[in-house]
Image (cartoon, grey):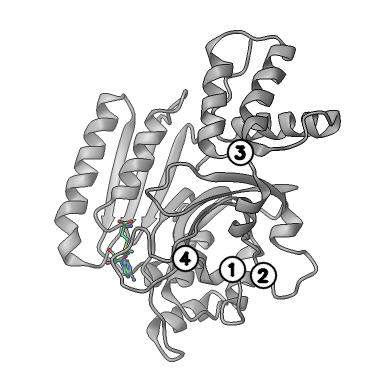
């Protein structure tokens, strides 16, 4: 989900576990057309049982980077992430020259935090009142990003609405915009070991106050469903700028009703378009054949046809499946 990261980059993985997310992220960065020249990866993990595995992962990633000619510095901090970041953000460490991060990837812990807990107190230090540790992680991680920095997180979707999470939504959306949102429709915690049944989202967010015009929402039944549905919605539909509660409307169910192309259809379309050089009429015909065959839309309505072709082309581009014709 990250947009390409080049040059010398600083990555953060708070609550890293065995470092699987970081390993996957670095692998995808090395596969970019222009990989970064240098990567610094900081991981935080408090569970001693995870440390040998995490250390091994950092060593493996260093090895892969070195073979790719990319400088890599891996850092394992066996510290409480909330404590360290609250200290950084309340001035102590930033003042001492701690650099903000270009990108953060996280699958944070999930549990309620009591009003008088240490975690709540740490959140108050950055002006946030929140009742779950996962939203505390999201807020602290956002605070450590540079302007324009990116975040990919897998979290329960409970933050999207409800009064408990309202202060968090206000805090988070004051500096972050959502660029892409993936929703798992089944109620289980996709990449977690806790037993709480939750609907999960993976989102890509950017640290900026510039609200985009649109946001991409995809949805799949669960992680084994390889054919997600795709939809682009006006940003104001995701978060109404006039809503003081900043409710985030992730309406995955709508996707099924709207008969938008599935990822598999788009992929097939991308392959057909990419194989040979087509002129615009051929391109339009292929797109219509692939999409209208399943959508049941009226193919005689030229405006609808153009809209469909536009949507499909945009979707392909956004998903990196569209090979531009030279
Ligand atoms: C849901 S697991 C995710 C692990 C890993 N990111 C993954 O996706 O496989 C959350 C991790 O955060 C760690 N953790 C919990 N509280 C923490 C804290 N305050 N500071 C640092 N790590 C913490 C846990 O030990 C656990 O390994």
Residue assigned mark 3: 261
Q: Going 60% across and 78% down the picture, which residue do you hit?
A: 162
Q: Is residue 170 above or below residue 223?
A: below
Res 199 label: 4
Q: Residue at x 59, y 57 (%)?
A: 252
Disc 2, disc 1: CB below 8 Å? yes
The relative height of residue 63 versus residue 213 in the rendered view (above or below) is above
In the rendered image, which residue does mark 1 sit on? 160
Whichever of labels 2 and 1 marks the residue nearer the N terminus, that label is 1
Tell me the crowding category of disc 4: few under 14, some 14 to 19, or many 20 or more residues within 10 angstroms, Cα based. Answer: some
Q: Residues within 10 Å of mark 1 (few under 14, many from 20)?
A: some
* Closer mark to the observer between disc 3 and disc 2: 3
Along the viewing direction, whichever of 24 and 68 lies nearer the viewer? 24
Residue 58 lies, with reference to residue 326, above or below; the image says below
The residue singled out by tag 2 in the image is 247
- Please provide percent x and percent y for residue 68: 30, 25
Discs 1/3, front: 3
């Amino acid at each position: 989900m990250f947009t390409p990261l080049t040059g010398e980059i600083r990555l953060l993985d708070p609550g890293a576990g065995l470092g699987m997310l970081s390993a996957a992220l670095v692998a995808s960065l090395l596969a970019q057309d222009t990989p970064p020249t240098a990567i610094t990866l900081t991981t935080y993990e408090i569970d001693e049982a995870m440390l040998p595995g995490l250390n091994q992962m950092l060593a493996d990633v260093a090895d892969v980077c070195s073979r790719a000619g990319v400088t890599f510095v891996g850092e394992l901090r066996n510290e409480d992430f909330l404590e360290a970041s609250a200290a950084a953000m309340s001035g102590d460490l930033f003042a001492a020259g701690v650099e903000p991060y270009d990108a953060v990837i996280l699958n944070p812990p999930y549990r309620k935090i009591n009003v008088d807990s240490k975690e709540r107190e740490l959140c108050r230090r950055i002006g946030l009142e929140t009742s779950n540790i996962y939203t505390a992680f999201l807020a602290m991680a956002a605070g450590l990003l540079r302007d324009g920095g990116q975040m990919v997180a897998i979290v329960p979707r409970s933050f999207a609405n409800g009064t408990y999470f309202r202060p968090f939504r206000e805090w988070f959306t004051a500096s972050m915009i959502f660029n892409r949102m993936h929703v798992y429709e089944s109620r289980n915690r996709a990449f977690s070991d806790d037993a709480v049944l939750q609907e999960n989202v993976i989102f890509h967010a950017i640290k900026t106050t510039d609200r985009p015009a649109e946001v991409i929402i995809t949805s799949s039944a669960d992680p084994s469903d390889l054919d997600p549905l795709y939809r682009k919605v006006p940003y104001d539909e995701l978060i109404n700028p006039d809503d003081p509660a900043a409710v985030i409307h992730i309406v995955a169910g709508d996707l099924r009703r709207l008969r938008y192309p599935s990822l598999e259809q788009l992929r097939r379309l991308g392959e057909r378009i990419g194989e040979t050089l087509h002129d615009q009429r051929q391109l339009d015909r292929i797109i219509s054949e692939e999409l209208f065959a399943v959508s049941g839309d009226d193919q005689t309505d030229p405006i609808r046809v153009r809209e469909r072709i536009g949507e499909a082309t945009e979707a392909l581009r956004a998903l990196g499946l569209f090979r531009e014709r030279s």
